[in-house]
Each structure stands twice: as structure tokens, then as C-alpha cells.
Image (spheres, grey):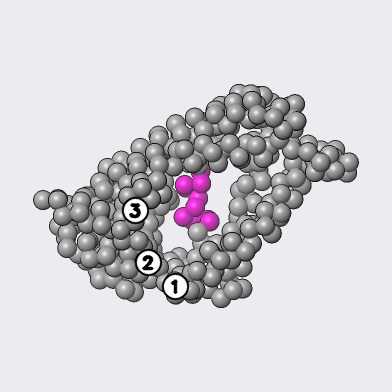
């Protein structure tokens, strides 16, 4: 509250005051958590030989991420405060609609605008692999004409692939670490897994589930925020100094939702695994690929069941191979 009072001594605009308030808190948070971020994001990655970044490249990537986040986040921050001032306690409804629209737009622009800021993306040169992947996409009901690689190795030794975008911006992206260390059969099973998410309608289901979770979360945050204002000496929901309470309640609700969303995600992963084997008829190659990815990415092969239930969005390799072993 004192910070808001101090800022308003110099700035009369609500929106500019909000921006200065958020930037100040962000800088304080950055300083407080700098040792933790360094330890988890840089030190551990180098200790276990997973990172290819120098310290300054790590800093640069972090700055780029912060700038991109600011370009997207600041307009959303202003739009949120506008809905808060305009709609009062029911701000969650128009803001939920807004966030749904933004998420759809971001899904379309991430592959063609945002990812190239961080990676060099080029068409793959392996025509044999490209033909395999395009044929797989047709079997999944997709119209994909181009397959791309990105220089994942500039930051990490980990390997990954992704199927991103919506509509005309759909992209198949293969990390160069995957292309350099895996056979065509193995890569084919990885991409078949990604297509399995499309074939089993996980993308649509995730949009539907995510929308429900978002509206429910915003609703609960709005109610809890209003109820808790008096606990901290606030009187209005539009008071800038009270807005951190929104993030506090959001974190609490997110913690409760985590095992639910992770359970759904793991269920979808099993279904995509099954599709990969059925579509390629290469169960052994897929299992071998999962084993190699686990080793390369230093995944925990057998986490405690409670840890996996709460924290894991993907099943452990032990449970994935067990599931595939039961597949005829």
C-alpha cells in the first residue's frame, strides 16, 4: 500500500501507476529470486552437462524472454485493469473471453513470429524423413507440406520435437539435437506421437478444458480477492496495491488444479503413445526412442508415485513402457 501511495505522489494516471507498480515489484522479485534462478537455470544445467550456454548467453536469452513477455504482457495488464474498473466484481467474465481470444491468436503467431526470435528455423534437408512425416500427417488427417528444424543445440543438449500452430501456421518442428542423434524410424515415432494428439482430438479437448479451467479460476480469484481485501486493509478491488492478492489466490488455485490437469495430460500422452505405435507399427523403435530421450534429458525413470501423480504432466518412462507393453 505504501508503494502505491508513493507512486501516486508523482503519477496521476491509473494505468501508468499500475505499470510502475508492477515493474517495481518485478524488479524486487528478480533480485530476491536471482540466486535460485541461477542455481536451477544455469548451475544445475551445467553441472549435469545439459546446457550449451555460456553465462552471458544465458543472460541474453533471459532478457529476450523478458522483453517478449513484456510486449505481450503489458497490453494484457492494461486490458485486465480496464475490465476490473469497468465491470467490477464480474471482471472475470469479459477477461476470460479476452484471454480465450488471445490464446487462440498466440497459438497462431508463436511458430511464425515468436519462436524465430529465439531459434533459427529452416526446412529440414532430409527428403526421405520429410516424406515419411508428410505421409504420417496425411494418415492423421493433416495437411502438412513443410517440416522444419530449429537449432535447439545452441542452448541445450536435450532433444525434442513439437507440432505447433493453428490453421495455416501449423508447423512440425524438430530440434537439431533430435535429428543428429536419432534414426529416421525413431524420429518417425516421435512425430507420430505428436500427430496422435491431433488425431485423438487432444488439441480441441485441451482448448475446451483449458477454457473451463480459466473461467473457473478467474471466477474463484475474483471472489476470494474481494473477500480478502479487508484482511489486508484494502477497501476497493481496483486498488493497485491489492492486485498482488490476485496472483496469490491464483497460485493457490493453480496448486489445487495441478494434479487434475496433470492427470488429464498423462491420459492424453498414453493415447498419443498408443497412436504412434499403431500408425508406425514400430513399437520397439518407439520404446527405444523413449528410453534414449529419458537418458538424454536426464528424466527420472521411476519417480515416487505421489510425485508423478502431482507434478508430472507426462507419465514416467516406466509407466509409458508398461502401457506400450500391454498394447497388442
Does residue 324 appear in the picture of this structure?
yes
Residue in the picture at 61% in, 68% down: 59
Question: Where is the N terminus found, in terms of image quarters?
Answer: top right
Residues in magenta, as a range: 105-114
Q: Does 125 sit above or below residue 307?
A: below
SS state under label 2: loop
- Residue 22 is a magenta residue: no
Residue in the picture at 67% in, 53% down: 29
Residue in the picture at 40% in, 42% down: 259
Disc 1 crowd rating (10 Å Cα; few below 14, some 14-19, many 20+) is: few
Q: Which residue is mark 3?
A: 304
In the drawing, what numbered circle is on residue 48?
A: 1
Disc 2 crowd rating (10 Å Cα; few below 14, some 14-19, many 20+) is: few
**Is residue 7 toward the left or the right of residue 305 in the image?**
right
Out of 312 and 172, give the one closest to the viewer.
312
- Earlier in the chain: of badge 1 and badge 2, it is 1
In the drawing, what numbered circle is on residue 298?
A: 2
Do tag 1 and tag 3 residues touch (Cβ < 8 Å)?
no
Residue 83: x %, y % from top left: 65, 30
**Is residue 183 toward the left or the right of residue 69 in the image?**
left
Residue 63: x %, y % from top left: 63, 62
Amino acid at each position: 500500500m505504501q508503494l502505491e501511495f508513493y507512486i501516486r505522489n508523482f503519477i496521476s494516471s491509473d494505468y501508468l501507476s499500475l505499470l510502475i507498480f508492477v515493474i517495481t515489484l518485478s524488479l524486487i522479485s528478480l533480485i530476491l529470486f536471482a540466486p535460485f534462478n541461477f542455481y536451477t537455470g544455469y548451475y544445475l544445467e551445467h553441472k549435469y552437462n545439459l546446457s550449451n550456454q555460456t553465462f552471458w548467453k544465458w543472460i541474453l536469452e533471459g532478457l529476450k524472454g523478458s522483453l517478449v513477455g513484456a510486449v505481450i504482457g503489458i497490453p494484457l495488464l492494461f486490458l485486465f485493469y480496464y475490465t476490473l474498473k469497468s465491470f467490477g466484481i464480474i471482471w472475470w467474465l469479459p477477461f476470460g473471453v479476452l484471454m480465450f481470444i488471445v490464446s487462440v491468436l498466440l497459438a497462431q503467431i508463436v511458430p511464425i513470429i515468436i519462436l524465430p526470435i529465439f531459434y533459427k528455423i529452416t526446412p529440414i534437408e532430409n527428403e526421405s524423413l520429410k516424406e515419411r512425416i508428410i505421409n504420417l500427417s496425411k494418415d492423421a488427417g493433416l495437411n502438412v507440406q513443410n517440416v522444419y528444424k530449429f537449432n535447439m543445440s545452441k542452448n541445450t543438449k536435450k532433444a525434442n520435437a513439437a507440432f505447433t500452430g493453428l490453421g495455416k501456421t501449423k508447423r512440425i518442428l524438430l530440434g537439431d539435437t533430435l535429428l543428429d542423434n536419432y534414426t529416421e524410424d525413431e524420429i518417425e515415432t516421435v512425430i507420430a506421437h505428436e500427430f496422435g494428439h491431433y488425431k485423438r482430438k487432444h488439441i480441441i479437448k485441451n482448448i475446451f478444458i483449458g477454457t473451463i479451467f480459466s473461467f473457473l479460476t478467474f471466477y474463484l480469484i475474483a471472489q476470494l480477492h474481494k473477500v480478502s481485501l479487508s484482511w489486508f486493509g484494502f477497501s476497493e478491488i481496483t486498488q493497485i496495491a491489492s492486485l498482488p492478492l490476485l496472483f496469490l489466490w491464483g497460485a493457490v488455485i493453480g496448486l489445487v488444479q495441478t494434479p487434475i490437469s496433470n492427470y488429464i495430460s498423462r491420459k492424453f500422452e498414453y493415447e498419443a503413445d498408443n497412436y504412434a505405435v499403431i500408425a508406425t507399427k514400430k513399437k520397439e523403435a518407439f520404446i527405444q526412442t523413449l528410453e534414449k530421450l529419458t537418458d538424454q534429458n536426464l528424466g527420472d525413470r521411476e519417480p515416487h508415485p505421489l510425485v508423478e501423480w502431482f507434478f508430472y504432466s507426462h507419465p514416467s518412462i516406466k509407466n509409458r513402457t508398461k502401457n506400450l507393453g500391454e498394447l497388442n
